Image: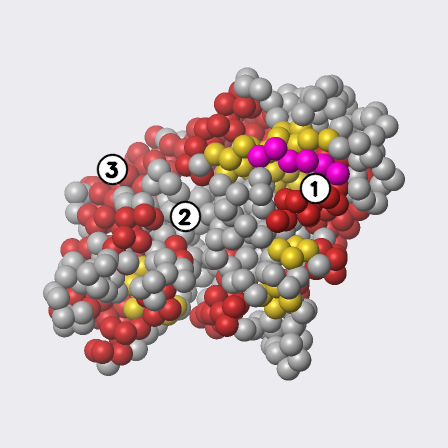
Amino acid sequence: MNKAFIPFSAAALGVLVVMTGCGSQNSAGGLPSNTGNGTKAGTYPIVSQKETLKVLTKQEPYVEDYNTNDFTKFLENKTNIHVDWQVIPAADAKTKIQVQLAGGQLPDIFMNDSLSDSQIVDYGTQGVFIPLNQLIDKYAPNIKKMMDQNPNLKQYMVAPDGNIYNIPDVGGVLHTAMPKKMWIYKPWLDKLGLKVPTTTAELYNVLKAFKTQDPNGKGNEIPLSGASANAPVNASNNEPESFIMQSFIYYDRTTYLYLNNGQVQFSADKPAFRDGVKYMRQLVQDGLLQPEAFTQDRKALTALAEDPSGDRLGAATSLYWGHFTIDNGPSGRYKDYVAVPVLAGPDGKRYGYDRGYPVTAGGFAIAKDCKDPIAAIRWMDYFYNEQAQLDEGWSPYWGQIGVGWKKPDAGIKGIDGRTPTYEAIIPFGTKTNSRWSQTNPGYQTPDYILSEAATPASENEVRLFDATNQLYKPYSDAQQQVPHMFFSDEDLAKNGDLQKNLDNIVQQFLIKFATGNLDVNNDSDWNKYLKELDNAGLKQYVQIYQDNYAKLKK
């Protein structure tokens, strides 16, 4: 599976890079002085005399050791820039990055989804990050070409003061645009003579059969479960409400906002949202949806799906099966879960969450003390031309030709049925030391991604492409998605607390309603929830987005 993206407006975590020997950099957007160590722009190596980058990175699960990694060695030889890696656990990345920004020893380069929108704007306008506008224009032809080809990237790159402080991670496979999926255990469907459900009523009946007809022969089945997006180790897209709400209302778990005829609206106070909560309460009450699905982490969910005593989990909500089973694992259960489409709700409608072409702000930024930002931007520019990397025989994602990938054999078709340009040898999900996997940001066009050969090694991509294209895209409601926007300092200061408080209220009441601690059918309990939202500044929250959306559309 290629790049795995989080929702556009959510804070994303990633990699932090540091260059040794840092100095000063102007903050007016002009070009820094040349150190004299650089080569001609657009050529390699980047520097004549070797420089070192200290890289603090969130551990990519499919990379064994960045120090001895084959792609690390290749890139150093190509650029003449050595990387001194410092690896931190994913669970600690957000805290450690904020400590650095708030007064710790600054790195030179932040890389790969490490920065939130508020950090980009706050620390950019404070001068912690340097403007990249002219650096891109003169020294980053791949990034500049990407921007020219995608004018909409402006809303992910240009801060309210007109400066560019970050370069986003752009592109991804089709299935990441619609990540709120459900996967159901086909052996149980087959044993009970059932079909994959297509409506909320059918899902209820299938889960009821899983509970009452004992498909595993042990009487310990869990018909449906998931994991909380608020768990200590993020389980984004595992939350059950995001899949289920697509049958009732357009639901963005990050902001709870959607567009209705050009007006920004809040989904989690609408009658349709309440209907969705009522449906989830019925599932929990009847023993069909595990109550822990709203609070447990992905590790607990995976332990259930991979129970060594045998199959116990009937269905789970997830971007893909590898987020609740062990992908390519010894049990083989990852192969037996099939996609459930966006379900038709009680009114027959579907509201498929679709965030569009995946773009994640905060992919790359340079800190103020970097002595050689020209070398830094040129080093990063390398990653924004995937096809040129394959033409050279090396890819950070796939590794070396003949090892991680090869030219496709004659007669093989690509994932989308066209003639492919590359064929995987080592499939995604394999821990190896030959490549960086998803460590770096970059630019992947849909044509490039779908030109992978459809072979057993790319089975995951084919399964996910087919499932999304056939069962999710037909029900996409992308026109209701609120686009990414950078806010002014004033709006950022207001919105941060508003969004956090409203999210806490929605999640607390959702859990109470779903598990029966409050009665979602009781108007008094529901009105108490609505009052909490109002007191937390719901109207102001929506108005901030509405005003900024109006500015964006001008």
Residue 315, horizontal then vertical, whole percent = 29, 63
Residue displayed at 52% across by 29% down: 97
Q: Position of residue 414 (x, y in %)?
A: 61, 73
User: Which of these two is toward me, 31 or 88?
Assistant: 88
Sooner in the amino-acid sequence: mark 1 or mark 2:
1
On residue 76, which mark appears? Answer: 1
Where is residue 212? Give x, y as percent.
13, 69
Amino acid carrying label 3: it is Lys
Q: Reading the chain from its start, which is encountered first: label 3 or label 1?
A: 1
Does any portion of residue 115 appear in the rendered image? no
Residue appearing at x 44%, y 49% in the figure: 252
Specify whether 542 is left or right of 204.
Answer: right
Q: Report which quarter residue 30 is drawn in.
A: top right
Q: Element type at marker 3? A: helix
Checking the image for residue 528, the label placed there is: 3
Q: Is residue 446 left or right of residue 65?
A: right
Quarter of the image with the C terminus is: top right
Q: Amino acid at mark 2?
A: Ser
Q: Nearer the viewer, residue 30 or 45?
A: 45
SS class, disc 2: loop
Q: CA distance from mark 3 to mark 1?
A: 60 Å
In this view of the protein, which residue sits in the foreground, 468 or 45? 45
| Residue 372 is inside the magenta segment | no
Main SS type for the magenta part? strand
Magenta residues, as a range? 80-85
Q: Is residue 99 left or right of residue 372?
A: left
Residue that carries the numbered disc 2 in the rendered image: 236
